């Protein structure tokens, strides 16, 4: 499929990032690195660490934040999808744990996880849109949540400076007046340039090249599919992996860096949580209007990648 057109409205957004901050200075004491190296090569200054809280804890707190902001009746939710590669357990799903923690016990709710690594939230939005479109579900809680610190080797300077923990959530309902476009792909990678066993392993430069290429091609493909020009886009929310990847996309697409929402300095790469956290902060920080178009773009292990445009 790749390209898909649908409709939903974002009823509310929320996020939760743990209180504990791990700064570049802290990392200087743990591995052979410097604040200057990390900041100049990645744009990251600090990241959050869950310190005992689980992925479902973070996901539940982000969901509560979204419910409270819109004063939304939690009993309306009939679909819960969590994008994560760091579930609390192999089974049950984080989505079922969130359902229990939120006290959603109405029969007929469907709750499940998906793993598309850092593109997971965009994949989950597409699945939610299809399920709302079917008419069988009315209200979707879509979450990206990760506790990456539990699969982080704090002796490996190639990876431990990059990642952090967090969660973001959105509540969606069907709305025919608000168009959503998707351009989603995966490319099975037998070389495993990015994978997780006990810890995250990565060929940084190869992932960097892949990411820079697919951010540009995903957005270009989406704009062509939707007959969009750059003037129609209010903001682009990229997966927050490396400021240099975002800058290279800005240059390749000839879209000013100011049009990209950036919070990587505060949280590092939170994988599936990075886009929904940024979306929530962007809606809190910036003046937006109904009908504004927002573009989300992500990439990650798999390899997975894709972009999505939303109408506020
Ligand atoms: N502190 C200090 N030096 C470090 C370091 C660190 N934390 N990590 C790596 N280095 C060293 C390397 O060992 C290498 O040393 P050498 O030249 O003596 O061999 C040097 O810095 C340059 O390493 P290199 O990997 O070429 O740097 P880079 O400019 O490509 O930046 C990344 C490294 C990881 C920041 C960059 O490749 C990147 O961001 N890749 C994408 C990662 C990503 O986004 N992953 C998740 C995708 S969802």
Image (spheres, rainbow, N blue to C red):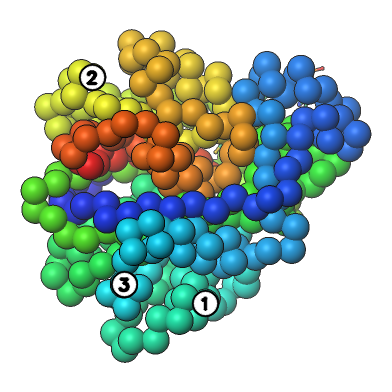
Sequence-first tag of 3 and 1: 3
Helix, strand or loop at label 3? It is loop
Dot 3 and dot 2 residues touching (CB under 8 Å): no
Seen at 65% across and 65% down, the residue is 54
Residue identifier under label 3: 73
Quarter of the figure that contains the C terminus: top left
In the image, 149: left or right of 269? Answer: right
Q: Is label 3 or label 2 in front?
A: 3
Label 2–label 1 contact, CB within 8 A: no
Compare marks 2 and 1 and give the one earlier in the sequence.
Answer: 1
The local crowd at label 1, few if under 14, some if 14 to 19, many if 20 or more residues have their Cα within 10 Å, is some
Quadrant for ligand 1 reads top right
Frontmost of labels 3 and 1 is: 3
Q: Are marks 3 and 1 in contact (CB under 8 Å)?
A: no
Label 2 element class = helix
Task: Write the residue at 82% across / 44% down.
Answer: 154
Q: Residue at x 31, y 72 (%)?
A: 73
Residue 44 screen position, x and y as percent: 65, 28
Return the mark for residue 101. 1
Q: Quadrant of residue 182?
A: top left
| Label annotation for residue 155 | none
The reply, left or right, for residue 69 in relation to residue 294 is right
> Upstream in the sequence, badge 3 or badge 2?
3
The quadrant holding residue 216 is: top left
The reply to whether the residue tagged 3 has its Cβ within 8 angstroms of ligand 1 is no
Which residue sits at x=68%, y=16%? Answer: 40
Provide residue 277's location: percent of width, then percent of height: 48, 45
Side (left or right) of 243 relative to 159: left
Q: Which residue is mark 2?
A: 230
Query: Is 280 drawn above or below residue 11 in the view shown?
Result: above
């Amino acid at each position: 499929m790749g390209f898909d057109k649908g409709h939903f409205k974002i009823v509310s957004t929320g996020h939760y990032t743990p209180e504990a901050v791990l700064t570049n200075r802290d990392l200087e004491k743990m591995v052979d690195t410097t604040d200057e190296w990390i900041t100049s090569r990645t744009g990251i200054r600090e990241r959050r660490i869950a310190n005992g809280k689980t992925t479902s804890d973070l996901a539940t707190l982000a969901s509560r934040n979204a419910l409270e902001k819109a004063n939304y009746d939690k009993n309306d939710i009939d679909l819960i999808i969590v994008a994560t590669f760091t579930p609390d357990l192999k089974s049950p799903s984080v989505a079922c744990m969130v359902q229990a923690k939120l006290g959603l016990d109405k029969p007929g709710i469907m709750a499940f996880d998906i793993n598309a690594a850092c593109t997971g939230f965009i994949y989950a939005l597409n699945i939610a849109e299809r399920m709302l479109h079917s008419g069988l579900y009315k209200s979707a809680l879509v979450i990206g949540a990760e506790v990456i610190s539990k699969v982080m080797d704090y002796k490996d300077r190639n990876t431990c400076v990059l990642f952090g923990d967090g969660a973001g959530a959105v509540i969606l309902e069907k709305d025919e007046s608000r168009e959503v476009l998707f351009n989603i792909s995966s490319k099975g990678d037998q070389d495993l340039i990015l994978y997780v066993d006990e810890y995250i392993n990565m060929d940084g430069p190869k992932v960097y090249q892949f990411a820079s290429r697919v951010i540009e091609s995903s957005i270009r493909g989406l704009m062509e599919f939707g007959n969009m020009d750059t003037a129609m886009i209010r903001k682009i929310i990229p997966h927050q992996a490396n400021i240099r990847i975002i800058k290279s996309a800005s240059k390749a697409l000839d879209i000013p860096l100011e049009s990209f929402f950036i919070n990587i300095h505060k949280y590092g790469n939170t994988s599936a949580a990075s886009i929904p956290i940024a979306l929530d902060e962007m809606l809190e920080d910036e003046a937006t209007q109904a009908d504004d178009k927002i573009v989300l773009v992500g990439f990650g292990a798999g390899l997975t990648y894709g972009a999505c445009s939303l109408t506020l």
